[in-house]
Amino acid sequence: MAVLNRVLRSRRPGSFFSLRSFRSSSFLNSETDLKASASVIPKPLPLHRDVKDRNVRWVFLGCPGVGKGTYASRLCHLLGVPHIATGDLVRDELAASGPFALQLAEVVNQGKLVSDEIIINLLSKRLEASAAKGETGFILDGFPRTIRQAEILEGVTDIDLVVNLKLREEALLAKCLGRRICSDCGGNYNVASIDIKAEDGNPGMYMAPLLPPPQCASKLITRSDDTEEVVKERLRIYNDMSQPVEEFYRSRGKLLEFDLPGGIPESWPKLLRALNLEDPEDKWSAAA
């Protein structure tokens, strides 16, 4: 904890910092830190935030398939900040044959998880590149996923809001099983038409399918890991890992929980209201 505090005190507000030389012995004890954290009242978002505000430092969390990338990228377009997804960082490093490419290729080929050290190095490099270009904000997509990653991230930059997207499990499962990829162009689509009736006090929910154009319709393939058994296990693992991370940010007054009420037409306007934002073009309210 002392090490991270020294890092934070040494940085100018809003600056980025690389933790390439840090080791696990420097990180605070997660359980002790969480127990010591007092209850914090969530910090209110500014009323009517200016969509030209390019200084947001947000994180988007949520189960696989919930739509983190979709909503994060649309907010980035609206706010004019970069969308940083760890999956993209890994793919870019592999494509560019960067310094971590060999290690990443071995990890990916073996189906293992990329280490925290590599992810943080890639993220630090990306943030440094953003700072060099004069970019002062960003939205992180799907990171951090563990307490350790959240602790390290605190020493890299100041996060001011964490949006945790939630979707009912039955809808999430149907959405994941409906995912399709065009084998020709690589486009992502979803053939699931989700229509959950209201019952037992729970509201109904409708999510329209995202169908491909005619030229892709006969070329759709399913991801090999998009089976009901695999998806349920993936969701179980995520839920087990995410709860401590959610509490980490909740205890710091930075967590905004948002239950998706349906597809993009229903969810996008409500998400904007929750963030005190307006979309002057209002072009994202149509189903994508």
Image (tube, grey):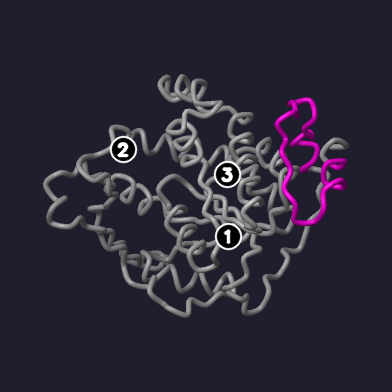
Q: Real-space Cα distance between discs 2 and 3?
A: 22 Å
> Which residue range is magenta in the image?
5-34
Left or right, residue 186 beside residue 4? left
Picture disc at residue 226: 2
Residue at 29% over, 49% down = 188
- Sequence-wise first label, 2 or 3: 3
Question: Is 209 situated above or below 64?
Answer: below
Q: CA distance from mark 2 to mark 1?
A: 26 Å
Residue 276 spot, x, y in % from top left: 59, 75
Name the element at disc 3: loop
Q: What residue lies at 67% left-to-right and 42% top-to-bottom?
A: 150
- Residue type marked 2: Asp
Residue type at mark 3: give it.
Phe
Give the residue pinned by disc 1: 257
Could you say where residue 90 lies in the image, as x and y percent from the top left? 49, 35
At a point 45% along the width and 74% down the height, the residue shown is: 269
- For the residues labelled 3 and 1, the Cα–Cα distance comes to 16 Å
Residue hosting label 3: 143
Q: Which secondary structure lies at badge 1?
A: strand
- Which of the two discs, 3 and 1, sits closer to the camera? 3
Q: Position of residue 107 (x, y in %)?
A: 48, 22
- Residue 8 is a magenta residue: yes
Q: Residue furthest front?
A: 133
